[in-house]
Every structure is written in structure tokens, then in C-alpha cells.
């Protein structure tokens, strides 16, 4: 089974590429969505994303414990698309409030990503995972934003080490990082 990580900036074509790869897979697809509709704008984004997916794909909307949820809901899917890790890390992060303890949050994020990596290893399916590369811009101005950036970077590193292939998306073009 093949596992792929697609990373890049906002609107770089990551989700579209993940869906293209899913359509090419030739088997059942389980689409794992990690977004929560916290406001009207995000609800519209989620609605648009839902409409863009093929009707025969199964969708699993889950905000945490993604690895466990995939194992419980895989069914006959041969491909799993996770969109995305950026929001998953945010979901884990938010459970600790506005001023979280860095060590506590780091352990929780690492546990979430380890659970996902264990799922990839134990599941007989291809995985296509979408995440954002948020460490390329300016240094965030506050402690909590810097902590989030750092923890997402660590999560991405854990996944990049585990998966078979990594692509950096720029303007809809995948650049090979690891193959």
C-alpha cells in the first residue's frame, strides 16, 4: 500500500490533487474531513468541499482520534484521503484553551499523529494526506501562534517520515520531495 503526503501553502492545489489521486485509485474511497464549521464562512467552505467530491465516496467527518475512526469506518475502502492535518492539529490544540501548556499540547498532538501513523501501518489501504506548510512565512507575533506553527511542523515531520511519498504543491503543480 502506498502513502502520500501533500503539503504546501493555502490554495496551492493540495485538496484538488488529493481528489485527483483518489479518483485514479480505482477502488472505494473513504474521505476523512477534519474541519469544523465554527462560523458561516467555514460552513460554506465545508459545503463546497462536500459538493466537489464524487457521490460514491464515503465521507467521515471527525475532528480528533482520526486513526481510531478510520479503523472503525474503513469498510471496503481501498483509498483513504485525509483533508487535512492542519485542522486536525488545530482541533487537538483547541481543547487546551487560549493559553495552553506547551508540553501538554505537544504530547497530545504527537499522540494523535502517532495514532494515525499506526493506522496507516495496520490498514490495507492507500493513504493520501493533505497538510499545510505554515513555517515559510514571518514568525508569528504571539506565543500561542508560534506554538501552533511549531507543533504543526512537528506533526508534518512525523508524517513525512512515515509515508512513502511527499509532494510540495505550488500553484497546482506537485514537486517531488520524497519518492
Image (cartoon, grey):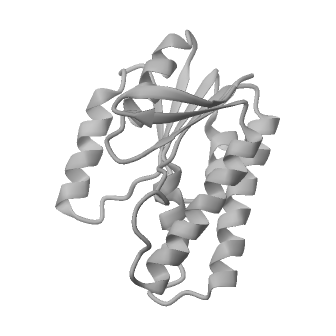
Residue beneath the point at 53% across and 51% down: 85
User: How many marks on residues?
Assistant: 0
Residue beneath the point at 36% across and 28% down: 172
Q: Nearer the viewer, residue 7 or 114?
A: 7
Q: Is residue 68 visible?
A: no
Side (left or right) of 11 relative to 179: left
Q: Nearer the viewer, residue 23 or 58?
A: 23
Q: Is residue 67 visible?
A: yes
Quarter that holds the N terminus: top right
Q: Check the image and report above or below for 116 versus 48.
A: below
Quarter that holds the C terminus: top right
Q: Residue 137 location, x and y as percent?
A: 40, 61
Q: Residue 10 location, x and y as percent?
A: 35, 47
State which quadrant residue 42 falls in: bottom left
Q: Check the image and report above or below for 83 versus 35.
A: above
Residue beneath the point at 51% across and 67% down: 149
Q: Residue 95 location, x and y as percent?
A: 52, 77
State which quadrant residue 70 falls in: top right
Q: Nearer the viewer, residue 150 or 22?
A: 150
Q: Check the image and report above or below for 93 versus 116.
A: below
Residue beneath the point at 61% across and 51% down: 66
Side (left or right) of 116 relative to 174: right
Q: Residue 60 location, x and y as percent?
A: 49, 41
Amino acid at each position: 500500500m502506498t502513502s502520500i503526503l501533500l503539503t504546501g501553502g493555502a490554495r496551492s492545489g493540495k485538496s484538488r490533487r488529493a481528489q485527483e489521486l483518489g479518483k485514479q485509485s480505482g477502488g472505494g474511497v473513504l474521505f476523512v474531513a477534519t474541519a469544523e464549521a465554527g462560523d458561516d464562512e467555514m460552513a460554506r467552505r465545508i459545503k463546497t468541499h462536500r459538493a466537489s467530491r464524487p457521490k460514491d465516496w464515503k465521507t467521515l467527518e471527525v475532528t480528533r482520534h482520526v486513526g481510531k475512526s478510520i479503523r472503525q469506518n474503513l469498510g471496503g475502502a481501498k483509498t483513504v484521503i485525509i483533508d487535512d492535518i492542519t485542522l486536525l492539529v488545530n482541533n487537538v490544540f483547541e481543547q487546551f484553551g487560549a493559553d495552553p501548556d506547551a508540553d501538554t499540547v505537544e504530547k497530545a498532538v504527537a499522540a494523535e499523529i502517532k495514532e494515525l501513523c499506526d493506522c496507516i501501518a495496520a490498514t490495507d489501504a492507500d493513504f493520501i494526506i493533505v497538510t499545510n506548510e505554515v513555517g515559510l512565512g514571518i514568525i508569528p507575533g504571539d506565543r500561542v501562534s508560534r506554538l501552533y506553527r511549531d507543533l504543526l511542523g512537528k506533526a508534518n515531520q512525523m508524517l513525512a517520515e512515515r509515508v512513502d511519498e511527499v509532494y510540495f504543491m505550488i500553484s497546482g503543480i506537485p514537486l517531488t520531495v520524497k519518492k
